Image: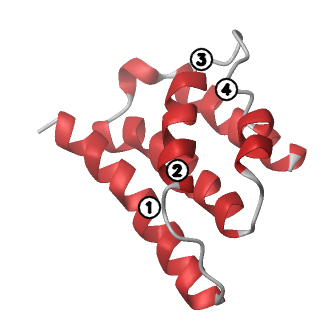
Amino acid sequence: MSRLLLIISSLFVSFGVNAAQQTSSQKCAKYEIMAHYIMLVRQDGLPMSKALQEFKVDDKDNPYGEIERKIIIDAYSQPKYETKEYKDKEITEFANKYMLGCMAMYE
């Protein structure tokens, strides 16, 4: 799990470097990625308390803590599926929901 957080963190750092030059889809991709990984760990059975700890939602140095908390709450209010097919579909749909919501703000 720590490796996953390192990957996500590095993605967010790269998103922040040229934020002024990014298109709306590039800016929104960070929320899509965040939602994807949160739903992935949810579908893998990680307890919600562990997800909140792993994503360090209460860490003052985490600029995404509040949004991650909200996405985690949303993810854990969705059903957990048993088959890989349904898990993959739920992960994709959940990530798309956040990408779509962000993109709608730029319309």
The residue that label 4 is drawn on is 57
Mark 1 and mark 3 residues within 8 Å of each other at the beta carbon: no
Q: Amino acid type of disc 1? A: Phe
Structural distance between the alpha carbons of marks 2 and 4: 14 Å
Q: The residue tagged with tag 3: helix, strand or loop?
A: loop
Mark 4 or mark 2, which is nearer the start of the sequence?
2
Depth check, mark 2 against mark 4: the one in front is 4
Nearer-the-camera pick, 73 or 20: 73
* 62 vs 106: above or below: above
Q: How is the image coloured?
A: secondary structure
Nearer-the-camera pick, 7 or 1: 1
The residue that label 3 is drawn on is 63
**On the picture, is 3 further left or further right than 57?**
right
Q: Which mark is residue 35?
A: 2
Q: Amino acid type of disc 2? A: Ala
**On the picture, is 38 further left or further right than 31?**
right
Q: Which mark is residue 94?
A: 1
Mark 2 and mark 1 residues within 8 Å of each other at the beta carbon: yes
At 56% from the left and 21% from the top, the residue drawn is: 17
At 79% from the left and 34% from the top, the residue drawn is: 53
Picture coordinates of residue 30, whole percent (x, y): 50, 40
CA neighbours of label 2 inside 10 A, class few (<14), some (14 to 19), many (20+):
many
Q: The residue tagged with tag 2: helix, strand or loop?
A: helix
